[in-house]
Amino acid sequence: MAKLKTKIKAEPSLAQIGKLVAEYRGQKWALIPLFQVMQDEFGYIPPESIDLIAKALGLFPVQVQGVISFYAQLYTKPQGRNVVRVCRGTACHVRGGKTILKLAKQYLGLEEGETTPDYEYTLETVACIGVCALAPNIVIGTTTYGHMNPKKVAQLLGERKGRE
Ligand code: FES
């Protein structure tokens, strides 16, 4: 199996969230950087942080929630240490992307948007990632794996099936 990103994500306490948010007090412009730091630190944006962020930055909670909802890269649920994204763009689709997704679901035991109970993997689909010449593609963490076929999917994700 390929070497995957294995950053451990922590379940943050309110005190940890508050400490991080306090560093951005009064800085409305820093909402996105704060989200990025929070996701790097905790792996997601805890829903309980929304009111704290709004109060600290001088925004309404609905504004904070609205920005989170707008960006698909922002998560309010813990993500797996390895986020597996199968491209569902047209080029990948016509070159077998549907089969690649089906196999990824089988190997990981997940449907789209789901995370394994041990938070090892999250499975998502994405629109075209801009490397159609390599279609069909899977992205794991920040690494793109192109020209995927059933054998390569087995090499990338098959080991997980063997552990269950
Ligand atoms: S459609 Fe998959 S990379 Fe473009």
Image (spheres, rainbow, N blue to C red):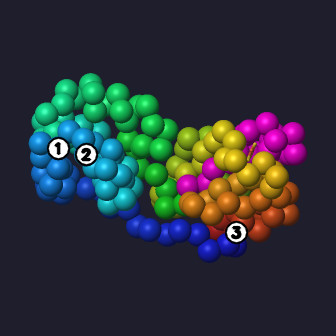
Q: Nearer the viewer, residue 128 or 162?
A: 128
Q: In the figure, 61 relative to 23: above or below?
A: above
Asked which quadrant contains residue 43, the reply is bottom left
Q: Going by the image, does 81 lie left or right of 87?
A: left
The part of the chain drawn in magenta is 83-102
Q: Are marks 1 and 2 in contact (CB under 8 Å)?
A: yes
Q: Nearer the viewer, residue 10 or 93?
A: 93
- Give the mark toward the camera: 1 or 3: 1
Residue 92 falls within the magenta-colored stretch: yes
Secondary structure found at label 2: helix
Q: Nearer the viewer, residue 33 or 113?
A: 33
> Which residue is labeled 2 in the image?
30
Magenta stretch, main secondary structure, is: helix
The span from disc 2 to disc 3 (Cα, nearest Å) is 41 Å
Q: Considering only order in the chain, which callout, 3 or 2, is on the residue closer to the N terminus?
A: 2
Number of marks drawn: 3
Mark seen at residue 83: none
Q: Considering only order in the chain, which callout, 3 or 1, is on the residue closer to the N terminus?
A: 1
> Which residue is labeled 1 in the image?
27
Q: Is residue 81 visible?
A: yes
Quadrant into which the N terminus falls:
bottom right
At 79% from the left edge and 36% from the top edge, which residue is drawn?
A: 90
Asked which quadrant contains residue 60, the reply is top left
Q: Residue 115 appears at what percent x and percent y?
A: 52, 49
Secondary structure found at label 1: loop
Specify the quarter for ligand 1. Answer: top right
At 18% from the left edge and 35% from the top edge, which residue is drawn?
A: 54
Q: Residue 124 appears at what percent x and percent y?
A: 60, 45
Q: Going by the image, does 73 lie left or right of 106?
A: left
The span from disc 1 to disc 2 (Cα, nearest Å) is 5 Å
The span from disc 1 to disc 3 (Cα, nearest Å) is 46 Å
Q: How would you rate the neighbour count of disc 2 (Cα within 10 Å): few for under 14, some for 14-19, many for 20 or more?
A: few
